[in-house]
Amino acid sequence: MGNLYIGLVHWPILNREGRILASALTGIDLHDIARSARTFDVKRYYVITPLKSQQEIAHRIQRYWLDLKEEDTTHRAEALHQAEIVATLDDSLTHVLNIEGQRPLIVATSARSLHKERVTFDRLRAQIEGEDRPVYLVFGTGWGLASEVVQRVDAVLPPIYGPGEYNHLSVRAAAAIILYRLRGRSE
Amino acid sequence: MGNLYIGLVHWPILNREGRILASALTGIDLHDIARSARTFDVKRYYVITPLKSQQEIAHRIQRYWLDLKEEDTTHRAEALHQAEIVATLDDSLTHVLNIEGQRPLIVATSARSLHKERVTFDRLRAQIEGEDRPVYLVFGTGWGLASEVVQRVDAVLPPIYGPGEYNHLSVRAAAAIILYRLRGRSE
């Protein structure tokens, strides 16, 4: 079992014009990415937003499902259990450090090609399976991670493509594919 | 380029107790799966529901985005352009038949292991790339496709797993992974 962590950044991210902003929390991101994270053995899923009102919404969604005791919602509760709502990327890194006792390898994901050292999916998969060092994958919302985040990571994963050049996947879909690529199995 | 079609079935599907019902349309399924479909070169994405009120909601969402002429929404419009809202699986099959001039190979997807002939991801990928015959992938909502749908398909794809046994992915996440597995590329 590898030590994989993920974070979903709502600030600082880019808007269409390349300006830095904070994006609003999307309830379905909390659910879908938590379920994918649970399926692909992610240890913690950090929902990162400095906005108190947004943190409160995330906490309320999480509490609602954790408090429900109905039988058909246990798999949702199990997934949301691992979500941690934090203010900044640094807060989440401190959290990982406290669990693991060492700084994780921080890897950004992007739909664009970033000017940064790349790590291939195969190499990162092998590293996670090798368990040498925890890995922390960072996902952006909006139009992607701000360059101040990208500058701080150790490496970036290449974009996901289909047969053509269109690659406007939702962050939920991209996260599912990337986690599958790193930890999934299928016949 | 292969001739790949997908359908999202809202009836007949199963609820938690294994009873047949119609599920409500989820707006985000329309968007996310359309964007994944466009990325992975799906020719048509059928949203299947016999409920007129639900069809109208789907049409309204689709029209809203197709009518928007703002620059940052063109990739959404491009994705939703391929969505077709139909009443039944048969209607969608007739639609594929009209485009392709032949019946597609119909393949069900499921989070469970179904008693049915399996096709592996690698074999189906090769078949799509070979372009011998169109392929139509069927996705269920709720707790999965009713057995009357499964009985009618030609084969099923195996479930997607992570390192453990938990595989409660959202249909949006599962569709993204399955389409990536059949048509995606990454370094």
Image (cartoon, coloured by chain):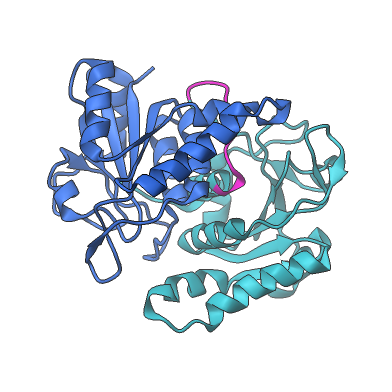
Chain colours: A cyan, B blue
Q: Which residues are magenta?
A: A163-172
Q: Residue at x 66, y 74 (%)?
A: A60
- Residue B88's place in the image compared with B94, above or below, is below
Point out residue B137 in the picture as x, y percentages from the top left corner. Answer: 30, 37
Query: Residue sitting at 81 percent across and 53 percent down?
Result: A11
Tell me residue A111's x, y (percent): 65, 35
Tell me, yes or no, if residue A12 can be seen here: yes
Name the residue nearer the viewer: A144 or A122: A144
Residue A33 as seen in the image, left or right of residue A94: left
Q: Is residue B39 magenta?
A: no
Vertical position of residue B47 compared to residue B3: above or below = below
Give the image quarter of residue B43: top left
Q: Is residue B117 left or right of residue B158?
A: left
Q: Is residue B187 visible?
A: no
Image coordinates for residue A158, horizontal then vertical, percent = 63, 34
Let me know if residue A164 is in the magenta part: yes
Position of residue A169 relative to residue B23, above or below, is above
Residue B51 x %, y %: 33, 48
Q: Is residue B20 positioned above or below B107 on the image?
A: below
Q: Which of A14/A156 is in front?
A: A14
Left or right of B31 in this view: A110: right
Q: How many marks?
A: 0
Q: Main secondary structure of the magenta part?
A: loop
Decide if residue B67 is on the left or right side of residue A103: left
**Residue placed at 22% from the left, 66% from the top?**
B19
Seen from the viewer's position, the closer of residues A94 and A78 is A78
